[in-house]
Amino acid sequence: MTAASVRVSSAWLRLREPADNAARASDLVEQVQPYLPAGERALIHDLGCGTGSMGRWLAPRLSGAQHWMLYDRDVDLLTGAASEMPGAAADGAAVTIETRQRDITWLDPGDLAGASLITASALLDMLTAEELERFVTTCARAGCPVLVTLSVIGHVELTPADPLDARVAAAFNAHQRRTTGGRRLLGPAAVGAAVDAFTRLGLDVLVRPSPWRLGAAQATLTAEWFRGWVGAACEQQPELAVATADYARHRVAEATAGRLSVTVHHHDLLARPR
């Protein structure tokens, strides 16, 4: 099993899309534009595209004609992503789409030949050390910028605070680093590992914070995120299920009523050829 073979709910991806869009470090887009070919169509590879939220966010922020190659293991997600991509760039130039049903952890450098930009989102923390090294090496050989957004770093803040927050957070982070199907996930360590790997291969790396800031206006997402957060913690430490039963009910009620604020910290990463 690989990270790319895990089916992610399209409903969850759509629910989180507005928070993703608000969180991404838009200043990195300004760093990408100079690398795109002037007067020619840019070839952009979106690895693990899901519902296509990265393309919907990024394509209209870049100028010039673009051809997006969307990769995902899930054919249903690919179909939906292709149907909802924007048709125009920031300057009105055409944006065209192509899809590839692939396991992105086993891409060959030839798959990315001629790329102008490689993108991915919410991916790195689901990889093993071996998969990440292979991912970085393949992307680096393409000789173009690599923009990877929204990787978790193991830090969340809940307001108002509760004494159980820290215990649940520690169990959740352990779950992110768990061994599953013989694979030891990197979880919150993934960004640091990626920075080291890209730097070793001679790329210049920029890292920016990209936190979700969830409040009353995101009550539905906050409640759903919290359920998943506690659920993963209890899966990692089953003894937490009893200890957090009342806590979880109370927190979900707070979230649903818009009284719980949550900051989920991520990092965005841009690796550029020197």
Image (cartoon, rainbow, N blue to C red):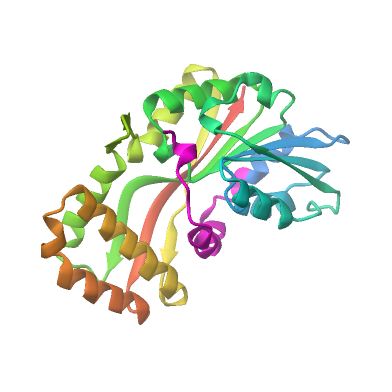
Name the one closer to the observer, 144 or 226.
226
As for residue 24 lying within the magenta part, the answer is yes
Q: Quadrant of the C terminus?
A: top right
Q: Which residues are magenta?
A: 1-28
Which residue is rendered at x = 43% and y = 73% of the image? 220
- Judged from this view, the residue extending furthest toward the bottom is 257
As for residue 68 lying within the magenta part, the answer is no
Q: Position of residue 226 (x, y in %)?
A: 32, 64
Residue 266 versus residue 177 in the image, above or below = below
Examine the image and state in which quarter residue 98 appears: top right
Is most of the magenta stretch helix, strand or loop?
helix
Residue 1 versus residue 167 in the image, above or below = above
Q: Quadrant of the N terminus?
A: top left
Residue 170 versus residue 115 in the image, above or below = below
Left of 199 or right of it: where is 113? Answer: right
Q: Position of residue 38 (x, y in %)?
A: 84, 35
Which residue is rendered at x = 67% and y = 20% of the image? 110
Residue 188 versus residue 172 in the image, above or below = above
Which residue is rendered at x = 37% and y = 62% of the image? 225
Counting the numbered discs, the total is 0
Examine the image and state in which quarter residue 33 appears: top right
Name the one closer to the observer, 63 or 59.
59
- Judged from this view, the residue extending furthest toward the right is 39
Q: Position of residue 35 (x, y in %)?
A: 72, 32
Which residue is rendered at x = 48% and y = 60% of the image? 12
